[in-house]
Image (cartoon, rainbow, N blue to C red):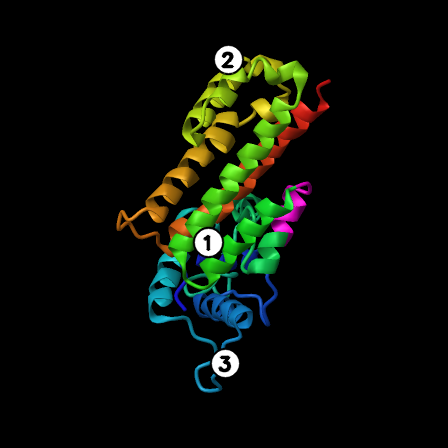
Amino acid sequence: MSHSYEEIRSVALAILCNKEIVPHYPNQYSSLYSSVSYAFAKRENKPHSSLNGYQLDYEDKGIMHELFWDLFRQGIITLGLNEANPNFPFFRITEYGKKMSDGQLGYFFHDLSSYEAVIRNEVPGMHNVTLLYLKEAMQAFRSGCMLSATVMLGVAVEHTFKLLTDVIESNPAKKRLFGPVFTERSFLKQFNKFKDIVKQNIQEFPGDIKEDFDTHFAGILSIIRTSRNEAGHPTGKIMDREQTFVLLHLMIPYSKKMYQLKQYFESIV
């Protein structure tokens, strides 16, 4: 099975940061390649060939080569291991890479159980119905059904937003302020009204909600909703693995922001 650039990058960074256990820590290009191959094979229950060891698919081999030099250009790894082995194919992770990789790695998941674990850790109070659709999205992604995965993510986005507006509508202290949201029937119009009202009153909100509000709420919601509409209607647009993998990631900061908002409105009496 072929993998996206982002999937291979996540696995390589996890190995370099000792977050993915492999038989031998890599210090040459060939050993990093073997370690990434091993990690994917272990997850996907691929057979082991005694002649060639674990092997990536043909397309993945090209991505792996590109990724190695990207990591070098980005300063995450540097060529040479020590004075005795100062050149390629030897390499080592840089101090900058060690510090950067934790942030770059972001949410590390590779299958249904690890995706669910990340979500439960980041958004402990997530509604079971939302989680059901997110798990279905991950299952579809793992099965190669990118359109289905994208549609499921869109459903999860809208369900999370609906839970938030339900809380506000049942709160007498805020129902009137957000009244224009509830008079709209379409999701898009409700979303736009809500966004405008929050931005007009943004100074009333605590710092954790104001931080990255446009990006983690409005920006991500728009991206996933647009992708869902393109996937769910006969547009002919194809979602590739890398795009879908990014959407699975984006759903997590979006959900965190939505539940921050939900908890805020629940706390107001």
Disc 3 element: loop
Q: Is residue 121 magenta?
A: yes
Above or below residue 60? Residue 260 is: above
Task: Tell me the tag on residue 78.
Answer: 1
Q: Assess whether mark 3 and mark 1 are in contact (beta carbons under 8 angstroms).
A: no
Tell me: residue 126, above or below residue 16: above
- SS type, badge 1: strand
Question: Does residue 201 belong to the magenta stretch?
Answer: no
Q: Which residues are magenta?
A: 117-125
Q: Pick the quarter of the image with the N terminus.
A: bottom left
> Looking at the image, is mark 2 or mark 3 earlier in the sequence?
3
Classed neighbour count for the residue bearing mark 3: other residues with Cα under 10 Å, few (<14), some (14–19), many (≥20): few
Q: Amino acid at mark 3?
A: Pro
| Amino acid type of the residue tagged 1 in the rendering | Thr
Q: Earlier in the sequence, mark 1 or mark 3?
A: 3
Q: Spatial distance from mark 2 to mark 3, Cα to Cα? A: 58 Å
**Quarter of the rendering occupied by the C terminus:** top right
> Which residue is found at the position 59% from the left and 48% from the top?
131
Quarter of the view holding residue 5: bottom left
> Which percent across, then down, holds residue 104?
52, 45
Instruction: Kindly identify the amino acid type of the residue bearing the numbered disc 2.
Output: Gln
Residue labelled with disc 2: 200
Q: Residues within 10 Å of mark 2 (few under 14, many from 20)?
A: few
Q: Is residue 19 visible?
A: no
First in sequence, mark 1 or 2: give its number. Answer: 1
Q: Which residue is mark 3?
A: 47
3D distance between C-alphas at marks 1 and 3? 33 Å
Q: Secondary structure at mark 2?
A: helix
